[in-house]
Structure formats: C-alpha cells, structure tokens
Image: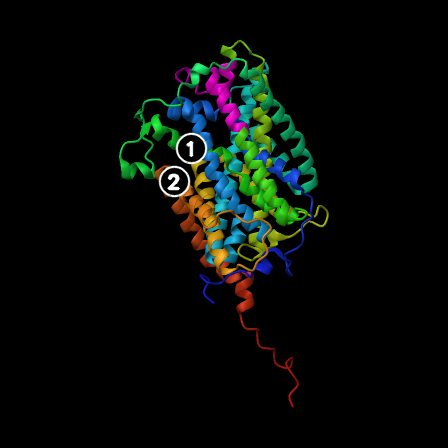
Amino acid sequence: MSTITRRLPPAEASGLRTGARHRLAQVYRTGDLVVLGLGVMIGAGIFSIAGQQAATMAGPGVILSFMIAGIACLLACLCYAELSSTMPASGSAYTFTYVIFGEVWAWIIGWALILELQVAAAVVARAWGQITVGALGNFGVRLPRSGLVEDGLVLLILVLLTGVVAVGARIGLRALWIMVSAKLLAIGAVVVVGVAYVDVANFGDFYVDPKPAAVPSATVLDLFFGQSQVFGWFGVFAAAPVIAFAYIGFDIVATAAEETVNPRGVVPKGMIRSLVIATVIYIAVAAVMVGMVPHTAISLDAPLSSAFEAAGVDWMVHVIDAGAVLGLTTVILVLIVGQTRVLFSMARDGLIPRGLAAISRAYHTPSRVTLVIGAIAILLAEFVPVLTMQELVVVGTLFAFLFVSAGVIVMRRRMPELERGFRVPLSPLLPALSLVATLWLMVNLRVQTWTWFALWMTFGLVVYLVYGRRHSVLAESERPPSPPLPGRGRHRR
C-alpha cells in the first residue's frame, strides 16, 4: 500500500497495541484539563501583549483584536474537540491526521508539532530567564550583569521541570494546580486594582486613523497588497495573528486524552472551557491596560508595570513580576508534557525509534523521551537565539489547525459511524470558517518565517523517507512473513 493512502485504523488510534504501546495512567479530570489549558495559554504575555499591540498596531481597537483572535481559535478548538472525542489519543493532531489522511500526512503534522512544541519550550525558557532576572532586580537583588546568571536560571528551570514531567503526571499536576492558582490571583489583582484607574476617554471609539507601517513586516499578505498599514481596521485585524500566539496551547490539552478519565466527554469540555476562560481573562487585562494609559503613551518595554507606576501603585509591579514568572513556569511545564506525548505516539507507531516509547516501570511515564526532549530544549535555549524564532511556533501550530479543521469535514463523510463524544455544530460551515480564519492568520506571518518552515519540513520529509516509511508499524504489518529456515518449517508429507 502507498504511504500516501496507508491510514491508521480508527480502532488502533485509541486502542492498545503490542510492543511499545502501553497504557498511560489516567489522572486527569475536567478541572485538571482546564488548569492544563490555562497553564499553557496564560503566560507572561498577558501583561505585555495588549499594550504592545495597542501602541504599535491597533490602538484601543486591540480589544477587538483579542475578540477576533479568540473567535478564530475557538473555531479550531471546536474541531479539535470533535476529533479528540472520537480518537482520544496522545498524538492529538498527528494521530487524527494518521487516521483521516494517511501516514505521510501524519508525519508532516507530527514534524510540525515537534517544531512548535520544542522551539516553544526553548523560547519560553529563555524568556523566563530574562523575566526572572528582571523580577529579582525589582525586588532589590543585585546580580552580575553577565549573561551567565540568566543562562544558569534557564538551565535550572528546564532541568527541574523536565524532572517533574519524567517522574510522573500526578506530581506535575499538583504543581500545576498550585502555580496556576497563584498566577490567576496575580491577574485578578491586576484587573481589580487597575479598574480603579481606568479613564473611559482612553477607549475612544476603538478606532485610530490608519497610517503606513514605519517598518514593513514583509508578510505573505504584503506580497499581494503592497506596503502594510498600522491602526485602522487593517491594524485591528493584523494584530489578531500576533495575539493568537497567546491563545495557542489549547491543542495541547488533546495530548492528555489517554491519561484522562472518560476522555470522550471530558477532553472537549476541558479544552473549550480553558480557551473561553483564557479569552475572557485576556480581554479583561487588555481593557484595563488600554483604559489606564492612552495608546500613544504606552511603554513598549513594560506596558502594564509602567501604567501602574504612573498611577502611583508601585507595589503592583512586584505582583506583575510574580505572575509573569509563575505564568512562564507553567507554560514550560505543559509544553514539555505535550511534546512528550506527541513523540511518544510517533515512537510507538514506529515513525521514530520505538525505544523512545518505553514506559518507566518506576514512574509509569514515558520518561526516556521526556529526558531527550528536555536535553534538546536546553541545547536550543542555551546556544540558539530562540527569541527570534517565535513565529516558527505559530506557523507549526496553525499548520496543524488546517488539517484538524479539514479533518472534521472529511471524517464526517468517510467515517460517519464512529462514536463522537462531541460534534462541531453547523458542520461543515464552522470547520470551513476555521480553515479560512487559520489561513488568514497564516498569511499574516513573515515570508522569512515561511522560508525557515519550508526548510524544516523538507528536512522532515527526508527523515521520513530514510527511516519512518520503512519502520512504521503499518509498514511492517504489510510485509510478507519471512520464509521458515531450512529444517524448521512444516513437516513434509
């Protein structure tokens, strides 16, 4: 059978197989999945992204940008919810694609997810180091100005969180509950205290007259429409792809499906609820940010902190610092969990070495692949300028969104008999709208990002042709059995 048409049977997508496939411990319930989603979606960007986009792109209309990005992500989230309720497997979009479109397409999505999650873990770890150094300075702790302190902090957090994930899901879940609760308290303080200093006049009519961008972004959209603009309605819509980066992460909830009790009903609830809650929180913080300071006076370095300092509420800077550090810590933790589960699924399917799918007898987790992921994240964060690679995280994620949205439409036609714990309403209209919204977000990414993504995917196809195509479980099952050795076959009559 051709690798283009070779598809994983639906029963095997969420069922157990022999060999490296083992059952992961079921530890998650609806509330746990909501915390998992909030852990990865709400990071330090909640304190900065609204101010930065208001000052440079959308003005007070950034609040509308948050709504647009939230709606676009919700459409994709609904599609993820249906597929994860039908195939509750750790591989998420990779496994969905394997069943619906075939092995080579599954590899492409898996390779894109590797890029998304691995680079994201390194990017966030490096940002965590910078923010932690700044927070310590704000608390009066004097540190050497060399980068060795930051490098040491990055190494420390990645080693610590990799160890937490490798030791067990229950330990990581307890830590996640504590940290997410603490950062939500910090965000709640920002909203409650900030509301008292909001000036309604700063909202205007959510519209600022457009003007040419000072530095053209060279996006794919620019190739067709020429020089880009900022502000106006174009700025409001152009800010949405940047803001969508903050919402990305709800898809990681799907990677916990095999570890969830009653996943067909629980995973969709956890995924959708976490995204809705995160959207409401982001919009609330954005409204406070824009309301406290006119968009022309927002500080790009520390928008929210500087706004509170201008209002004379200096102690809120420490609350914001604490929330930012905790926010990024939970993001790293969940990213490592998600990456571990995707690679675990690819390994047990034979597309990468199956030894990576081994389950630790002591901890009942795929600890081997977790340690590999942690080591790669450390190398990237310490030796690669990962902070310039944030858009690669976005393009890898959106690429998976395309296949998931299309997958709902195709699976409804090809496999209508499959049990679904959740169904996207108004299908195929909403999945089609999800496709359009995802494409809009993608064309607003830079051409340079697309170039690097194309190179990464080309390299991935070479890896598949050299290794995955011949070693996958499905490929081995299609090979004819080896002839018996002389003298060991059937008895001759």
The answer to whether residue 396 is seen in the rendering is yes
Q: Secondary structure at mark 2?
A: helix
Quadrant into which the C terminus falls: bottom right
- On screen, residue 390 versus residue 272, left or right, reads left
Identity of the residue drawn at 38% across and 26% down: 57
Q: Is residue 372 visible?
A: no
Of 116 and 273, nearer the camera is 273
Count of numbered tags: 2
Which residue range is magenta in the image? 281-308
Question: Majority secondary structure of the magenta segment?
Answer: helix
Specify the farthest residue to the right.
362
The residue pinned by badge 2 equals 440
Q: Which mark is residue 240?
A: 1
Marks 1/2 in contact by CB < 8 Å: the verdict is yes
x, y percentage for residue 346? 55, 53
Give the camera-side residue of 161 and 296.
296
Which quarter of the figure has residue 256?
Answer: top right
The amino acid sitting under disc 2 is Trp
**Amino acid at pointer 1:** Ala
Task: Provide residue 409's location: percent of width, then percent of height.
Answer: 47, 53
Q: Is residue 429 above or below residue 37?
A: below
Q: Residue 309: horizontal and vertical position, in percent? A: 51, 12
